[in-house]
Amino acid sequence: MPVTSDTLVDYPSGATSSRGIVLATVALAAGLGVVLDRTAFHPVDAGWPDQPADRGTLAGHPVIDAVVGATEGGEIVVGRDIPVRTGTEGWSFVVVHVLAADAGVTPGDEVEVTVDEGYRRGLSAGHTACHLASLALDAALAEAWTKPIGGDALGHPDFESNACESSRIHEYGSVDVYRVGKSLRRKGFDVTALDDLDALAARANARLADWVASGAGIRIDRDGDGLADRRRWVCELPGGDAVIPCGGTHLTSLGELASVTVGFERADVDGGVALTMRTTAS
Ligand SMILES: [Zn+2]
């Protein structure tokens, strides 16, 4: 049976279990790839692999990995073999659950998906903290810009979008790496703002403490239920909603956290400075 529509995904609403029909299986180097009509399983995205795949089971079989796949109706390709951007017309984007090669799952089966709730919760806390920390960093660096530049979700100069090189979420935290080189300096960023990293962390942490204390609500707005439909993280902060495009999972309120803190390290790299922000949520 050809797969002709996106997997319907339940994880944006926080679901950790679902029932679905097996639409297709595909033999992968890592095992047996299983595509369902719908799933609660969050897959890792090959293009921007910030949030890792969920852990859990499908029809009682351990899920070794969950990755984004794509198809034009024939062969299903996964990960870096996908030749088009997510959402490209004519393609369907699917969650590929990877099971052991000998798992007895076949098209037409109705199966139960169960996600490890503790691990999901840790990743959701880490992802929420990651977004909040990026907004606090932009605010703490607002004075470092000597020319006008586009604003972030709260209107501060958008250091995050202009400098972020990689973002990795783990349980109750994240690691973001920024690169400040010639192009950022040309856009008006004064790199001496990174000379006193303790002061930078103190400014960001003060703001993060205020935000966490607000207990602001968080929701995921979505254009549809398909994997490729656009979704947005909305945090209802006291000064107004912060909206960030995001395909991951999140807490439903900052009231679920006791604290979010950041620390910084810098390294001199070819042509500039690499800034690492480690974020911890509790
Ligand atoms: Zn995100």
Image (spheres, rainbow, N blue to C red):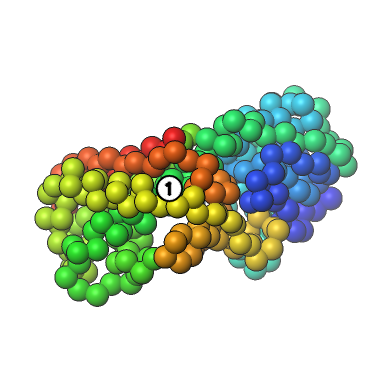
- From this viewpoint, is residue 105 visible? yes
Above or below, 198 relative to 238: above
Name the residue nearer the viewer: 100 or 60.
60
Disc 1 residue: CB within 8 Å of ligand 1? no
Left or right position of 143 against 115: left
- From this viewpoint, is residue 22 visible? no
Point out residue 254 in the picture as x, y percentages from the top left corner. Answer: 49, 48
User: Which of the 4 image quarters holds residue 116?
Assistant: top right
What residue is at 69 percent from the left and 39 percent from the top? 16
Name the residue nearer the viewer: 219 or 3.
219
What residue is at 32 percent from the left and 66 percent from the top? 156
Point out residue 134 in the picture as x, y percentages from the top left corner. Answer: 36, 53
Above or below, 137 relative to 29: below
What residue is at 29 percent from the left and 49 percent from the top? 206
10 Å crowding of disc 1: few (<14), some (14-19), many (20+): many
Left or right position of 59 against 223: right
Point out residue 275 in the picture as x, y percentages from the top left corner. Answer: 24, 46
User: Which of the 4 image quarters holds residue 266?
Assistant: top left
Q: How many marks on residues?
A: 1
Q: Mark 1 points at which residue?
A: 212
Q: In which quarter of the image is the C terminus?
A: top left
What residue is at 58 percent from the left and 56 percent from the top? 219
Above or below, 100 relative to 263: above
Point out residue 109 in the picture as x, y percentages from the top left corner. Answer: 87, 38
Determine whether the residue tagged by mark 1 lies in a helix, strand or loop: helix
Task: Indicate the amino acid at tag 1.
Answer: Val
